Image (spheres, rainbow, N blue to C red):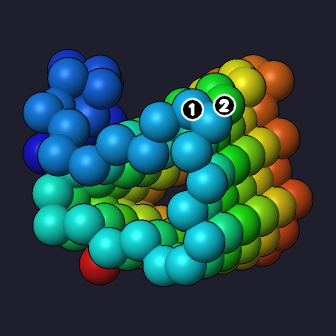
Amino acid sequence: MGAFSKKNKTALDLQAISTVISEGAVLEGSLKAPAFARVDGQVNGDVNIDEGLILGETGVITGNVTTKEMVVYGTVTGNLNVHSLEIRSTGKINGDIKTGSLSVETGAVYNGSLLMGKE
């Protein structure tokens, strides 16, 4: 059962975060992490996180993202390839999404194509 099932909707938010890009930090280049990560700063490059990614309200990613589970409160300009995706009301995505499951709150912005299917 994924982190976004009805019973366990906030599981990703409760995970122990192993990598943090804090607000005000700017990473120029690709980001790769083995577990769970949170981005509240800016990443200019591709992001590959093995387990899950939380993009905070002040977080900005300009590049493609690959991970298992993702919660978007901030802004992504690039393509997403994720198993489970949740776009919160403050989230903005400009790019194509490939995902197994998708949840979008009212107020979220998404511009791009969507491909959904089982893994």
Q: Amino acid at mark 1?
A: Glu
Residue 63, percent from left and from top: 65, 74
Confirm whether residue 58 shows in the render.
yes
Residue 31, percent from left and from top: 41, 71
Q: Residues within 10 Å of mark 1 (few under 14, many from 20)?
A: some
Q: Amino acid at mark 2?
A: Thr
> In the picture provided, is 94 more to the left or to the right than 14?
right
Quadrant of the rendered image containing residue 29: bottom right
Quadrant of the rendered image containing residue 92: top right
Q: Residues within 10 Å of mark 2 (few under 14, many from 20)?
A: some
> In the picture provided, is 3 more to the left or to the right than 54?
left
CB contact under 8 Å: marks 1 and 2: yes
Residue at 25% across, 66% down: 33
- Res 118 label: none
Dot 1: element: loop
Residue at 26% across, 34% down: 12
Find the distance from the CA under tag 1 to the CA under tag 2: 7 Å
Dot 2: element: loop
The tally of labels here is 2
Which residue is labeled 2 in the image? 58
Which residue is labeled 1 in the image? 23
